[in-house]
Amino acid sequence: MNILKFITAGSVDDGKSTLIGRLLYDTNSILDDQLEAIKKANRKNNDGTVDLAILTDGLKAEREQGITIDVAYKYFQTEKRKFIIADAPGHIQYTRNMVTGASNSELIIILIDARKGVIEQTKRHSFLAKLLSLKKVLVCVNKMDMVGFDSAVYEQIKADYLMLANRLGLENVDFIPVSALKGDNIVLRSERMSWYTGSSLLDYLETINIEDDKLQPWRFPVQWVIRPQTEDLHDYRGYAGRVLGEGLKIGEEVIVLPSGVKSTIKSIALAEQQLDQAQNGQSLIVHLTDDIDISRGDILVSADHPALAERNFEANICWFDNKSLDINQIYLLQNHSTLTKVKIADILYKFDVNTQEKQYSGDIHLNDIGKIEIKAAGEVVFDLHQDFPDNSQAILIDPRTNLTVGAVMIERVA
Amino acid sequence: MDYLDHLEAEAIYILREVAGQFENPALLFSGGKDSITLVHLAKKAFRPGKFPFPLVHIDTGHNFPETIEFRDWLVEQLGEKLIVGLVQESIDQGKAVEQKGKNASRNALQTVTLLDTIEKYGFDACIGGARRDEEKARAKERIFSVRDEFGQWDPKRQRPELWNILNGKIHKGENVRVFPISNWTELDVWNYIKREQIALPSIYFSHERDVVLRNGQWMAAAPFLQIDGEDIVEHKSVRFRTVGDMTCTAAVDSVATELDDIIEEIKASTVSERGARMDDKVSEAAMEDRKKQGYF
């Protein structure tokens, strides 16, 4: 059994909470005492049904205001899979929360109200899905009951969305017509939409393959050096970290970046278990044949396919702070286990997140997404976002407040 | 990757980030299954080296004797350092005031002792076994959760956490609570304990003991629980699904003596784990309020 992490995009009006509530309900993931707490809170929807949003709205302020402010993670599982839902607010003033939720997801469910079709919000969410390179987009055309389960409505929305996806360069899009409120095509295929021959939502989520066909050559950021320095382990020196990509194996030639020193993989261990080769995502201890100086922040890479080590590069950025990006200030760039001082050399443009048009003037404010040029005080080790998203990502920290102020995806070398 | 392998790899990664990013971290150890799982994960993260942090137990003085016995056995086995912060000491010093009445519990007083212990030893990061599936305020909490100088959590000023990048930068006096098993569910923990054959205190398994009915729940008849003629005391076969101290942790009827039985019992259960925690029943926002005060 593996894990699928997905984010639901949409607002309360699109039936997002109803959809999540329905998935949790119908997989028996809501327990009696939690239901009791909901009933006690006595919050009802306009139509008198129990408001399931209270399950996801964890903070007092959210319950009081009846809105989701922050990202909440929800967990459920079936016989086939374990699921982690990032439930993020959909409104434009919460773009940063959606970016956060999406960064921890593999698949995005985009909800479209069948009565409204593709709207501005749909475009914004789809743009973010593209920006963050989510592996799959599932469009749920919701409220099919409100349009008489009409296949023509669904087909029109599908055609409209495919045009949008094409324009954005979004691949891997699937569609399901649903009624979250009535439960159509959620767990079981709906008899009222016999014209639809695909899977139900749950069936889709349980079976969709999100593993990459081909992984990128491995990278191994060193988090910690294990040196017991005891009598019997006097010379022991293990590099601990989590491997990205594939192909890390014994005998493999490695380059240590940014120093450029070369060595060879002597052994690989997962705790006490010795491995011949590593799997993407494993937390391991690696030993090299040579006794060289490696510390936290260094990245071991395949000598045949090294990563980039550069000081100047261009990146997409989503801004998270109330204080706007300041090109005169020094920030810290954190990628993997490394902190590097950086300056923003230039703001190249920013996106209108609703129309995706580029604007060539103006500052980058809270929730803005734009492209910047970064100048680093030392070499930063990365891959380009288009080649290897997992090794192109970083955050910006404001050293005065220590807050995380930006999400960075490196697009090209400057 | 199998889901338990994935969760394990993620937790080990987080523990190593703590080691790398902080000067003086600690692992909060309660003697419960979640913190025992953390210790097991720390072994996977750092052996054959020593842990880069001590274990810290905030002892209410009302713990199950079985938990304390287990704690001491585990520390002995590990060869790691244990620091104990005593709630009784905070009471004696007048920093914490004992609650009165039949439902008195030292659970809330732990916060005082915890914050004192953090200050005394200068810990800049405290690793805890909280999980997001436990409680709705916890569902919102970050993996690296920053607390101010007064130990307070401000849910509205949390740092966004992107990808797996953890920002542990803090100002002097602040500290970070770290939750490596945030993404685990109760069932995941039990399945992992089974897979890894992790030892647990005996009270997690079915046993017979005297229990007293309080607010609809069976509590262990402990010497420091006020029991009078009106109380119903019974001798029952029970186990503890969650282990806090004796005043706030209720027993559940159970004949589960093996891990497989427990896993089946949890799968079939229609109430949540925190349903057996009196401390969460105080109000809708009981956990959020306690966390704001500095509770872990």
Image (tube, coloured by chain):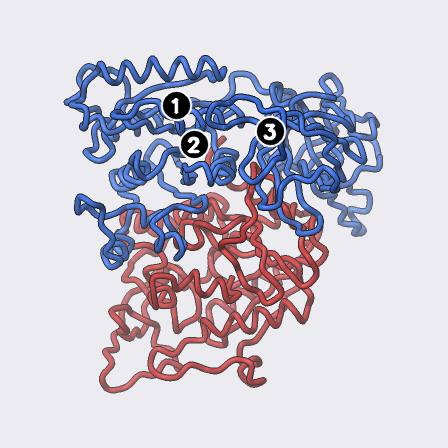
Chain colours: A blue, B red
Q: Amino acid at mark 1?
A: Ile
Which dot marks residue A370?
A: 3
Q: Amino acid at mark 2?
A: Leu
- The residue that mark 1 highlights is A208
- Which quadrant is home to the C terminus of chain A? top right
SS category of the residue bearing label 1: loop
Closer to us: A93 or A125: A93
| Label 3 to label 1: alpha-carbon separation | 32 Å
Is label 2 or label 3 in front? 3
Q: Mark 2 near mark 1, Cβ–Cβ under 8 Å?
A: yes
Subunit of label 1: A
Closer to us: A44 or A282: A44
Residue A410: x and y in percent read 65, 26
Is A400 on the left-hand or right-hand side of B271? right
Mark positioned earlier in the residue sequence (2 or 1): 2
Subunit of label 3: A
Residue A377: x and y in percent read 80, 36
Closer to us: A179 or A291: A179
Q: Is residue A344 above or below residue A139?
A: below
Which dot marks residue A4?
A: 2
Is A154 on the left-hand or right-hand side of A363? left
Residue A107: x and y in percent read 44, 28
| Label 2 to label 1: alpha-carbon separation | 9 Å
- Which quadrant is home to the N terminus of chain A? top left
Give the residue at the far front of this rendering: A361
